[in-house]
Image (spheres, grey):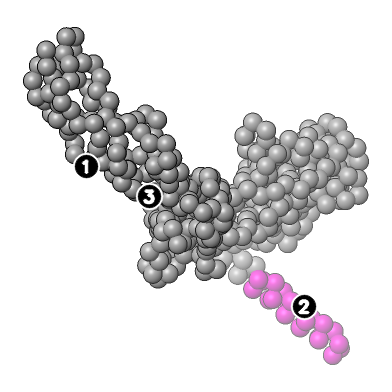
């Protein structure tokens, strides 16, 4: 009896419990039906529940297209080291506009972007020279790559070649007028260039251009160089393997000064000419040189000297080259040697010659000389041999009577200067007296 009573009570309790639930549901429905705010809340809850289901379920995926991707080249070292090949042209332009289709879960859809999608052109698969298709590869941190557009590139490969190219340094810009510029050192002085055979073989020179505008003191600068072909056209370097990408150049920049070379005989010649001869004069070409040194040293120098030239026993003029005496502290000098012209002449002497006869010429017709000076005294100056010969052989003075008529006249004298051009004749009296009669 007690057990039945308990069962009955339990059933009554269950009936009351479900009734309470039903009542509560009816109450909530009534409120939802009659209140718009509660309806909106219910919709929001439903959306959140659906979003939770989507984000936690990885089997729900979507596709996303990533555009304007830039591809990267890989495998070049394998291509050159293992197979001795090189890519002819730069594929950078073809790799600059790649599109990739990515399949990704709904939960990670927003994370996929160009920052985490990488496209590569793998050259390690190329085994032979020639033009061929090379597939593109793509990878992403989220989802998987479904498609690459384009999926391959047409490229040309050649045999790998290598050359050593000397570096030429060329100064450009406006130089200061009082400064000297010199390339002290370039590092490296030569480049090792590797790449496609046809490209490497077309390279004839490498130039680096150094701007010296406004430079007044030594400086060092690193500059990009250019590779040129035989026609002076620049060769692109993007697909070349270079031992260096720039050249470091050290430039000397120092003040200059124009300094004359001494022409003092004691500074130019040494020794004594043959007996009876003297060094008449010397000239030097060029007679001024440009010296490069520190300003303090330049300010202290007024003239330069040469290593003296020997004239021992010489009797004729000559020209020779002479070394310019320089200082170790000179940075540069415009010439290390100069030409020296040495004029050697006979010693000049003078003497009086007595009893020099006078010859009268061009006397007018019908005239006779009634009275005239027949002997004069002359002072002669000139080369020693000429003077000695004139003293021994003698010479005549000439008086020209052209146009003279009857009467007394003073007539000037002339001497054999055409025979002795280096001799000066100075008579004791510049004119002679003569009387002409009919």
In percent of the image, x 48 and y 52: which residue is there?
276
Question: In front: 150, or 120?
Answer: 120
User: Badge 1 local density, few (<14 within 10 Å), some, or many (20+)?
Assistant: few
Residue occupying image coordinates x 27% and y 25%: 359
Disc 2 + disc 1, Cβ < 8 Å: no
Q: Label 2's element?
A: helix
Up/down of 295 relative to 285, above or below: below
Which quarter of the rendering shows the C terminus?
top left
Q: Which residues are magenta?
A: 1-21
Q: CA distance from mark 3 to mark 1?
A: 18 Å
Q: Going from the N terminus, do you reach mark 3 or mark 1 first?
A: 3
Provide the residue designation for mark 2: 11
Q: Position of residue 172 (x, y in %)?
A: 49, 47
> Which of the numbered marks, if any, corresponds to residue 386?
none
| Residue 43 colored in magenta in the image | no
Check the image and report above or below for 11 versus 303. Answer: below
Residue closest to the far front: 370
Q: Nearer the viewer, mark 3 or mark 1?
A: 1
Q: Earlier in the sequence, mark 2 or mark 1?
A: 2
Residue closest to the eye, 258 or 200: 258
For marks 2 and 1, give the CA distance: 180 Å
- Identify the element where label 3 is drawn: strand
Kindly identify which residue carries mark 1. Answer: 428
* Residue positioned most to the top: 365
Residue at the image point whose x is 29% and y is 38% from the top: 355
Kindly identify which residue carries mark 3. Answer: 349
Q: Please provide percent x and percent y for residue 288.
A: 42, 52
Asked where in the image residue 98 lies, by quadrant, the reply is: top right
């Amino acid at each position: 009896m007690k057990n039945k009573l308990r069962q009955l009570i339990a059933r009554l309790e269950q009936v009351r419990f479900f009734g309470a639930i039903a009542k509560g549901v009816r109450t909530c429905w009534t409120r939802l039906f009659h209140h718009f705010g509660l309806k909106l809340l219910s919709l929001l809850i439903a959306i959140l529940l659906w979003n939770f289901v989507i984000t936690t379920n990885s089997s729900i995926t979507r596709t996303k297209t990533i555009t304007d991707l830039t591809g990267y080249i890989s495998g070049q070292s394998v291509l050159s080291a293992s197979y001795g090949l090189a890519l002819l042209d730069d594929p950078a332009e073809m790799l600059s506009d790649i599109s990739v289709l990515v399949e990704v879960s709904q939960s990670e859809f927003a994370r996929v972007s160009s920052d985490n999608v990488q496209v590569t052109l793998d050259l390690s698969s190329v085994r032979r020279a020639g033009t061929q298709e090379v597939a593109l590869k793509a990878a992403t941190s989220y989802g998987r790559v479904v498609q690459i557009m384009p999926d391959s590139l047409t490229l040309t490969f050649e045999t790998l070649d290598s050359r050593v190219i000397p570096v030429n340094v060329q100064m450009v810009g406006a130089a200061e007028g009082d400064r000297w510029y010199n390339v002290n050192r370039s590092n490296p002085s030569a480049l090792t260039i590797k790449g496609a055979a046809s490209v490497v073989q077309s390279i004839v020179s490498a130039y680096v251009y150094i701007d010296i505008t406004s430079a007044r003191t030594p400086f060092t600068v690193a500059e990009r160089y250019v590779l040129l072909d035989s026609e002076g056209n620049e060769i692109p370097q993007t697909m070349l393997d270079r031992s260096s990408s720039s050249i470091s150049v050290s430039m000397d920049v120092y003040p200059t000064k124009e300094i004359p070379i001494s022409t003092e005989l004691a500074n130019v010649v040494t020794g004594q000419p043959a007996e009876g001869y003297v060094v008449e004069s010397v000239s030097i070409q060029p007679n001024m040189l440009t010296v490069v040194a520190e300003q303090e040293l330049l300010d202290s120098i007024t003239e330069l000297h040469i290593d003296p030239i020997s004239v021992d026993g010489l009797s004729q003029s000559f020209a020779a080259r002479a070394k310019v005496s320089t200082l170790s502290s000179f940075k540069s000098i415009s010439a290390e040697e100069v030409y020296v012209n040495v004029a050697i002449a006979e010693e000049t002497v003078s003497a009086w010659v007595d009893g020099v006869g006078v010859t009268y010429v061009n006397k007018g017709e019908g005239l006779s000389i009634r009275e005239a000076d027949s002997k004069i005294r002359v002072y002669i100056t000139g080369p020693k041999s000429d003077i000695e010969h004139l003293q021994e052989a003698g010479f005549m003075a000439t008086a020209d009577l052209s146009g003279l008529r009857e009467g007394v006249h003073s007539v000037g004298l002339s001497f054999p200067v055409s025979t002795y051009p280096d001799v000066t004749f100075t008579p004791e009296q510049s004119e002679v007296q003569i009387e002409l009669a009919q």
